Image (tube, rainbow, N blue to C red):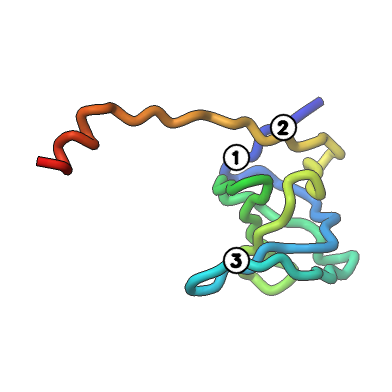
Amino acid sequence: MELKPSKGLKVKVNAQREAVFGDESVSVQGASIKEGARAGTMTGRTLVGFCEVEMQKLDGRAHWYPIEDLTGEHGEKLVEEEMPIELEEDEGQEEEQ
């Protein structure tokens, strides 16, 4: 069974890396998570293969982990669904005027 990342979804984190967002950049750093602190809750925010997970047992903060390194609370695989966003052509013309 596959799950799509969504708000409130309980997950197990098996990640060895996480994305860290700075003021002007993003870096991917190594992550070390103790066995008892691997449970988290997704916030529903995803970005280029990473998703935000609230880690209450780890430190109570939200962290960005690769979707491929997460599983549902019953071992389900998580998959990211891409949804293209279409912009209306009129928006760009209004800005030029």
Q: CA distance from mark 1 to mark 3?
A: 23 Å
The residue beneath circle 2 is 3
The earlier-in-sequence mark between 1 and 3 is 1
Q: Residue furthest right?
A: 35
**Coordinates of residue 72 in the picture (x, y in percent):** 78, 41
Q: CA distance from mark 2 to mark 3?
A: 26 Å
User: Do callouts 2 and 1 mark residues in contact (Cβ within 8 Å)?
Assistant: yes
Judge left or right: residue 37 versus residue 56. right
**In the rendered image of this protein, does residue 28 appear above or below residue 70?**
below
Identity of the residue drawn at 43% across and 31% down:
85
Residues packed near mark 1 inside 10 Å, few (<14), some (14 to 19) or many (20 plus): some
**In the rendered image of this protein, does residue 37 appear above or below residue 8?**
below
The earlier-in-sequence mark between 2 and 3 is 2
Marking on residue 26: 3
Mark 1 or mark 3: which is in front? Answer: 3
Hey, what amino acid is under mark 1? Ser
Secondary structure beneath label 1 = loop
Secondary structure beneath label 3 = strand
In this rendered view, identify the residue nearer to me: 57 or 89. 89
Q: Quadrant of residue 18?
A: bottom right
Q: CA distance from mark 2 to mark 1?
A: 9 Å
Q: Residue furthest left?
A: 97
**Coordinates of residue 81 in the picture (x, y in percent):** 63, 31
Secondary structure beneath label 2 = strand
Mark 2 or mark 3: which is in front? Answer: 3
In this rendered view, identify the residue nearer to me: 16 or 62. 16
